[in-house]
Image (cartoon, helix red, strand yellow):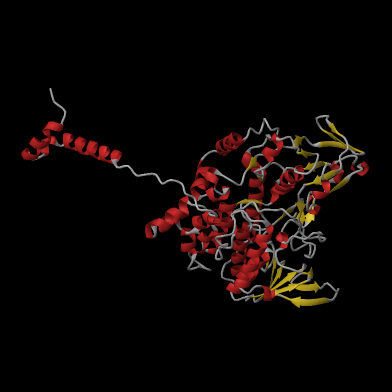
C-alpha cells in the first residue's frame, strides 16, 4: 500500500493535500520552493522566476463561504470577499489547526519523478523515494507574453510587462497606459491604474460580459448558485439560459453602449468579475479599444485605425501557460495548454495510479474546495480504497471533456481546463462516495435537504457522509448565512420596526368562514344556521 507521498507545492492545493494524506494515514512530505506557504496568494514585491505573483490590491473573486476548506469555515468576522493578506491569514489558521507546516520542507525545488531529487537554496541536492506524488503548482507560474502578435513592439519607447509583474499604480501617475486583455487581472489593473493615470486604454479582441461580485440584495454573487439553478440550466436550452443571464447583466449596464459586448454567449467564456469597470468607463478614465494593430515608437495603433500617442506603459494581461518541467515527458505531456488527465487529475496510461495533478482546473467558482475534493479522491486511490476504470474508459472520458469544452467555449488557451464548480464537485464527490443524496436528505432531514437543494453549494455539503465525514457539517450549513451577514454588522441599525396589523388577516379569515358557511349551509344545524343566516347573501 502507498505510504510516503511527496506533495509538490505549498499553496492552497498543497495544504489540502497534506491534510488529506494525514486523514488517510499516509505520510506526506511537502516541497515548497518559496520561503512560506500560500503559493499564489503570498504577495511579494519582487516576482520570483517560475512562480505565481499577484499585485498588492488583489481581492479574491469568490466569497468566503464558497472558497473555504470543507471542514474549516473561514471566521465569521472576515469579509465575504477577502484581500490576499486575509487569505494568507486563513491559510495559516488552517495549517496551524491541523498541524500541517511540520510536514513542509521549504526552499526546495524539484527534479526527477517518483525518485524525487530536491535542491535547496544553497544548491545542495538530495534524493528521496516516494510511493506517490501529488503535484500542486497551479497554472499561474509561466506568463503568456505573445509579443509576436504585436508588430513593432520592439520599437516601443515606453515600458511593457506581463500583469504578473504589476504591483502598484503610484509610479504611473499622470501617465498614459494601455492594458491588453479583459480578463479578471486586466479589468482590475485597468481600474486601479485609471485612478492615477492621465488615461487608460483597455484593449480587447472579443469584448467580454462583465459580472459583479455584489448580486441581488447585496449578496455575494456565488452564494446564489444552487442545485436548483444548476437543474434549470440543465433543463433549459443553452441559448435561453445565456439570454436570460445576459439580459440581467445588460440591465446593470448596456454592454453594447459601453463597447464591451462580445459576439460569444455569456457561458461560452470564463466570466470577468468587476464591480468598478463600468463606473470608470462612464467617467472616461478608461476607454475600451479593439485589438492592437501595431506599435510605432511611443504610439499605439488599434485595429479600428485610431492611434494613441505618447503611451508610457503597456500591461499584457494575456494569461498563463502551464507545464511540468520536472516530470518525464512520457508521464504526462502538455501541448497547447492541454494535458491528458482523467478528471483533470490522473494521467490515464500510467501502470499504477500513483501520480495526481491537483488544482489544474479553471473553475467557474472557487478553486480551494475543488483542490481539496481532488486530494480526498486521490489519496483514497493511492490507498487502493477507490479504483480507477480501465485505461480505455479514462481516455474516452478525457476526449469527451475536450470535445464538450470545444463545443461550448470560444477558442482560447484559457478554455482548456474549464469546469463548472457544482457539476465538477458532484462528479468527483460521486467517485469518492460523498455526494449529498438529496432525496434521502429530504426524507430523513427535510430542513437540511431543502438547504442543500435550494441553498448555495457550499463545500460543507461534501462532509455530510462517506469518507472524511465531519460532525460539524450540518451546523456549518445552517449557519452559513450568519457568517455572510456578520462582517457587515458594524453599526447598530435602528430601522423602525413595522407594526404588525391584524386587520387584513381578520378580514381574510372572516371571508373564508363566510364562504365556507355559505357553501355548506345545507349541512349546518338549524339553530346555528338561524344565527348566521342574517349574514348570508339573500337568495331569489
Front-most of residues 509 and 11: 509
From the viewer's perspective, tell me whether residue 499 is left or right of residue 31.
left
Across and down, in percent, residue 339 comes to 72, 55
Across and down, in percent, residue 422 comes to 56, 53
- The quadrant the C terminus occupies is top left
Front-most of residues 38 and 280: 280
Front-most of residues 386 and 73: 73
Q: Does the rendering let one see residue 389?
A: no
149 shown above or below 304: below
243 shown above or below 435: above
Q: Does the rendering let one see residue 188?
A: yes
Q: Quadrant of residue 439?
A: bottom left
- Residue drawn where x is 85% and y is 44% of the image: 313
Q: Quadrant of residue 265?
A: top right
From the viewer's perspective, tell me whether residue 24 is left or right of residue 309.
left
| Figure disc tally | 0
- Residue drawn where x is 46% and y is 52% of the image: 453
Across and down, in percent, residue 280 comes to 71, 39
From the viewer's perspective, tell me whether residue 513 is left or right of residue 104.
left
Across and down, in percent, residue 210 comes to 65, 40
- The quadrant the N terminus occupies is bottom right
Amino acid at each position: 500500500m502507498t505510504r510516503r507521498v511527496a506533495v509538490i507545492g505549498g499553496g492552497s492545493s498543497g495544504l489540502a493535500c497534506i491534510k488529506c494524506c494525514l486523514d488517510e494515514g499516509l505520510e506526506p512530505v511537502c516541497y515548497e520552493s518559496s520561503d512560506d506557504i500560500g503559493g499564489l496568494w503570498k504577495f511579494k514585491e519582487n516576482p520570483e522566476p517560475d512562480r505565481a505573483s499577484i499585485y498588492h490590491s488583489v481581492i479574491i473573486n469568490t466569497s468566503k463561504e464558497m472558497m473555504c476548506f470543507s471542514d474549516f469555515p473561514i471566521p465569521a468576522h472576515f469579509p465575504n470577499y477577502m484581500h490576499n493578506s486575509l487569505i494568507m491569514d486563513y491559510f495559516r489558521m488552517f495549517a496551524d489547526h491541523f498541524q500541517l507546516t511540520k510536514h513542509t520542507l521549504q526552499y526546495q525545488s524539484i527534479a526527477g519523478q517518483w525518485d524525487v531529487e530536491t535542491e535547496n537554496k544553497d544548491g545542495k541536492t538530495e534524493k528521496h523515494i516516494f510511493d506517490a506524488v501529488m503535484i500542486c503548482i497551479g497554472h499561474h507560474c509561466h506568463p503568456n507574453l505573445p509579443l509576436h502578435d504585436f508588430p513593432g513592439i520592439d520599437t516601443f519607447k515606453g515600458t511593457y510587462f506581463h500583469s504578473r509583474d504589476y504591483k502598484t499604480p503610484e509610479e504611473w501617475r499622470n501617465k498614459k497606459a494601455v492594458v491588453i486583455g479583459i480578463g479578471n487581472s486586466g479589468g482590475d489593473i485597468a481600474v486601479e491604474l485609471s485612478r492615477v493615470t492621465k488615461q487608460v486604454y483597455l484593449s480587447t479582441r472579443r469584448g467580454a460580459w462583465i459580472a459583479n461580485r455584489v448580486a441581488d440584495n447585496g449578496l455575494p454573487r456565488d452564494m446564489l448558485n444552487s442545485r436548483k439553478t444548476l437543474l434549470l440550466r440543465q433543463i433549459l436550452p443553452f441559448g435561453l439560459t445565456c439570454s436570460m443571464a445576459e439580459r440581467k447583466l445588460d440591465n446593470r449596464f448596456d454592454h453594447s453602449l459601453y463597447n464591451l459586448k462580445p459576439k460569444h454567449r455569456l457561458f461560452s467564456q470564463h466570466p470577468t468579475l468587476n464591480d468598478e469597470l463600468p463606473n470608470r468607463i462612464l467617467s472616461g478614465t478608461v476607454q475600451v479599444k479593439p485589438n492592437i494593430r501595431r506599435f510605432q515608437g511611443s504610439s499605439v495603433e488599434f485595429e479600428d485605425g485610431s492611434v494613441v500617442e505618447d503611451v508610457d506603459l503597456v500591461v499584457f494581461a494575456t494569461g498563463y501557460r502551464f507545464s511540468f518541467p520536472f516530470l518525464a515527458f512520457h508521464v504526462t505531456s502538455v501541448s497547447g495548454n492541454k494535458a491528458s488527465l482523467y478528471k483533470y487529475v490522473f494521467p490515464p496510461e500510467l501502470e499504477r495510479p500513483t501520480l495526481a495533478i491537483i488544482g489544474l482546473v479553471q473553475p467557474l467558482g472557487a478553486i480551494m474546495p475543488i483542490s481539496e475534493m481532488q486530494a480526498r479522491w486521490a489519496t483514497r486511490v493511492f490507498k487502493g480504497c477507490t479504483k480507477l476504470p480501465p485505461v480505455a474508459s479514462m481516455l474516452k472520458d478525457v476526449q469527451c471533456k475536450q470535445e464538450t469544452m470545444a463545443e461550448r467555449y470560444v477558442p482560447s488557451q484559457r478554455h482548456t481546463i474549464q469546469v463548472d464548480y457544482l457539476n465538477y464537485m458532484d462528479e468527483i464527490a460521486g467517485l469518492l462516495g460523498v455526494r449529498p443524496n438529496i432525496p434521502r436528505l429530504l426524507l430523513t432531514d427535510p430542513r437540511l435537504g431543502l438547504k442543500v437543494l435550494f441553498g448555495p453549494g457550499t463545500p460543507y455539503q461534501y462532509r455530510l457522509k462517506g469518507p472524511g465525514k465531519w460532525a460539524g457539517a450540518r451546523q456549518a450549513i445552517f449557519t452559513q448565512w450568519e457568517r455572510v451577514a456578520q462582517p457587515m454588522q458594524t453599526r447598530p441599525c435602528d430601522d423602525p420596526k413595522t407594526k404588525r396589523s391584524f386587520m387584513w388577516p381578520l378580514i381574510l379569515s372572516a371571508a373564508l368562514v363566510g364562504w365556507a358557511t355559505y357553501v355548506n349551509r345545507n349541512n349546518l344545524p338549524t339553530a346555528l344556521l338561524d344565527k348566521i343566516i342574517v349574514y348570508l347573501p339573500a337568495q331569489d
